[in-house]
Image: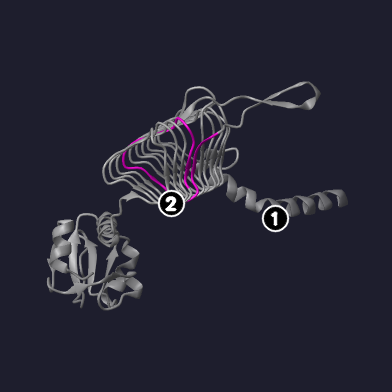
Amino acid sequence: MEISAKQISEILNGEVIGNENVLISNISKIEEGEKGTLSFIANPKYEKFLYTTESSIVLINKTLVVAKEIEPTIIKVDDAYKSFADLLDFYQQSKIKSKSGIHKLAYVDETSTLGTDVLVDASAYIGENCVIGNNTKIHPQVYVGDNVKIGNNVVLHPGVKIYHECVIKDNCIFHAGAVIGSDGFGFAPQEGDDYKKIPQIGNVIVEENVEIGANTTVDRATIGSTILKRGVKLDNHVQIAHNVVIGENTVMASHSAISGSSSIGKNCMIGGQVGITGHISITDRVKVAAQSGIGKEMKIKGEVVQGSPSFNIRDYQKSYVYFRKLPDMNNRISEIEKQLKKL
């Protein structure tokens, strides 16, 4: 698909400087730009490539002052990074052929209700008494258990499993292999060192605009609901345990895990390989650096922490300076002790 600078500026509400009729058919990095492609600059450190790139069109922030003449056509926007994301979305949607209907190799129980323009692709399974909203796309090998409710405009990529009784609201995307509603890790110790499984009779509720990465698992509640609030984003390979509540617009990177019955506030950012213990609460807008361990409640809004156990990131960074010097300090102390013995 070819699109002109003028058309792009209209989509992004931007200002064209240069040839508004120049066409692009692909996207490239600014430092690897080629004719017929579009690039963008959001980080000032890439500005130098603006004067050497061969890209035909470059998106830049309105605040960026161009220091000398350049060859590409420029489109100035309020936020180049956001506008680039919007353009990628437009590009992706233009390439996707909207499919609908029930494949002859799919199974949909006769007690379930499907909205309009729903796709149920080959080898997908829809159990009893399910309700599927309009324009929802269920790709091959998806399993939807009994009494599941799924909203409008939901995308379930291949191999997603949604256990019984779970609720998925509008505009959610679940990537391949995600498992929603598997049993929480509940076992009661018995005499003789055995364990008795505690039935997990709750469910999972996923609110609007949630995206869940590939092979991520969200366990059902023991009683009640595990809840992902509106706008939550989970990376690949994340583990959410039973009865966890994650607040609106909180994001978690890969290989992080939250233990049972903990609650995370709104607009938090959790780095990769973070572990959060059970039965604690974390307030809003907290940021947790990668590979940190959270073992107690966090009550200060907007706090940034690092380390395991975690503490304020500035204190951690200062402590790390000393930590790195410990071998040298130990050698110096040993030398001083030798000198003292001689005296």
Residue closest to the eye, 97 or 337: 97
Q: Which residues are magenta?
A: 160-182
Judged from this view, the residue extending furthest toward the right is 342
The answer to whether residue 331 is left or right of residue 211 is right
Q: Looking at the image, can residue 227 be seen?
A: no
Real-space Cα separation, disc 2 to disc 1, in angstroms: 68 Å
The quadrant in which residue 249 appears is top left
The quadrant in which residue 126 appears is top left
The answer to whether residue 308 is left or right of residue 147 is right
Helix, strand or loop under label 1: helix
Residue 242 in the image, given as x and y percentages of width and height: 53, 30
Q: Is residue 181 magenta?
A: yes
Q: Nearer the viewer, mark 2 or mark 1?
A: 2
Q: Looking at the image, can residue 274 be seen?
A: yes
Q: Earlier in the sequence, mark 2 or mark 1?
A: 2
Look at the image and tell me in which quarter the N terminus lies.
bottom left
User: What label does residue 105 carry, if any?
Assistant: 2
User: Who's the residue at 46% across and 28% down the image?
Assistant: 299
> Dot 2 surroundings within 10 Å: few (below 14), some, or many (20 or more)?
few
User: What label does residue 328 carry, if any?
Assistant: 1
Residue 101 in the image, given as x and y percentages of width and height: 32, 49
The answer to whether residue 167 is left or right of residue 333 is left
User: What label does residue 212 carry, if any?
Assistant: none
Q: Is residue 94 above or below residue 214?
A: below
Number of labels in the image equals 2
Q: Is residue 319 magenta?
A: no
Residue 273 in the image, given as x and y percentages of width and height: 55, 46
